[in-house]
Image (cartoon, rainbow, N blue to C red):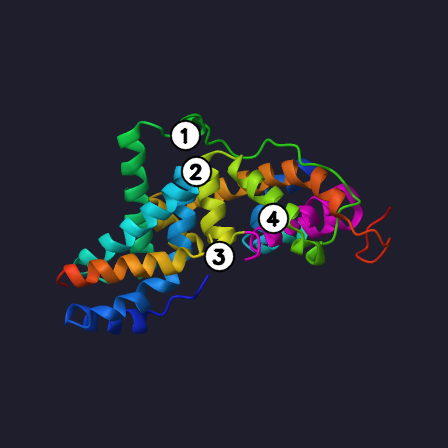
Amino acid sequence: MTASNPEFEADCIRRILAGEKHLFHDLIRPCERSIYFMLLSLLGSEAEAEDAAQETAIKVYLNLHHFRGDSQFRTWVLSIARNEGLGRLRKTGTRREDSLDAEIDEQTGDYTPAILTSWREIPSETLERKELGALLRKAIEGIPEIYRNVVLLRDIEEMDVRETAAALGITEGAVKVRLHRARALLQRDLVPRLKGFAPKRKGLFGWGA
Amino acid sequence: MRIDCKHVWDHISAYIDGEVDAGLRADIDRHLETCEICSAVLDSTRNVVVLVADDRVFELPAGFSERLHARLDKELELAGP
């Protein structure tokens, strides 16, 4: 994630609206990742998410004069991305079923974590291994949409609670509850499998054999 | 106050984010000192958070940015601000 810079954004927007159109590239670039991953989370297809991301960027440009600066620019952009994604889901009637189930399921707590005392340290060097990335992506794709969106914005794009709540149109309390549930689901799913990624040399990362 | 494992698990995410109040944090810390299981759950949950945040796990598709900006160039030419 690139940290937002309200002064740069405000200056950029003013100049774009005054005719320096090319500056839009610089304005939207820090938001690209968040736009794409939010749409990927909603739509579940890389090709569809990329197309929707392009449409989102165009809509942001065309509506730039509506941005009032009372929210962060990226939050505003992400709400446009979210509407774009939801509009596509409505059109095709292919809203992912998990999201419908999950909307009812808002209770907190009540989970049993995976208990593996042998997986304690971060296998950072093994991250280079492609399988680990695939494993993590698959785990995140496997959790219900309402949790996936929150993990994506909070833990992957590292947005704060307030910004995440604004982008998703939910309360800050709901962000915290969903994040807790999401992490619990991921921990339970991933930890038994990540254990296989322990380095061979015993003790290097504090793992037991 | 003595708290049980379930209580620790319920607050683990907020604990990782530094969002539990001082009293609860002290209770959890005291529990963690003697509970190997909760320590492992905390460490592994924190590891999961660190791993998913790694940029190498979630990469944009190759050429994504180039295609986006090429499309924007076309639109910017057509549209007025």
Callout 4–callout 2 Cβ contact below 8 Å: no
Please, which chain is the residue tagged with disc 1 on?
A: A
**How far apart in space, not on screen, are marks 4 and 2 (Cα)?**
17 Å
Callout 1–callout 3 Cβ contact below 8 Å: no
Q: Is residue A95 above or below residue A171?
A: above
Magenta-drawn stretch, dominant element (helix, strand or loop)? helix
Q: In front of the other: label 2 or label 1?
A: 2
Density class for disc 4 (Cα within 10 Å; few <14, some 14-19, many ≥20) is many
**How far apart in space, not on screen, are marks 3 and 2 (Cα)?**
21 Å
User: Quick one: SS at disc 4?
Assistant: helix
Density class for disc 3 (Cα within 10 Å; few <14, some 14-19, many ≥20) is some
- N-terminal label among 2 and 1: 2
The residue shown at (51%, 53%) is A156
Q: Which residue, given by chain and number where applicable, does mark 1 sit on?
A: A96
Q: Nearer the viewer, residue A136 or B71?
A: B71
User: Whole-percent x and y of residue B75?
Assistant: 21, 58
Q: Which residue, given by chain and number where applicable, does mark 2 sit on?
A: A44
- Residue A40 in magenta? no
Which residues are drawn in magenta? B28-57
User: Whole-percent x and y of residue A113?
Assistant: 67, 36
Q: Which mark is residue A133?
A: 4
Callout 2–callout 1 Cβ contact below 8 Å: yes
**How far apart in space, not on screen, are marks 1 and 4 (Cα)?**
23 Å
Left or right of A4 in this view: A186:
right
- N-terminal label among 4 and 3: 4
User: Whole-percent x and y of residue A73?
Assistant: 30, 61
Residue type of the residue flagged with mark 1 = Arg
Q: In front of the other: label 3 or label 2?
A: 2
Q: Which residue, given by chain and number where applicable, does mark 3 sit on?
A: A158
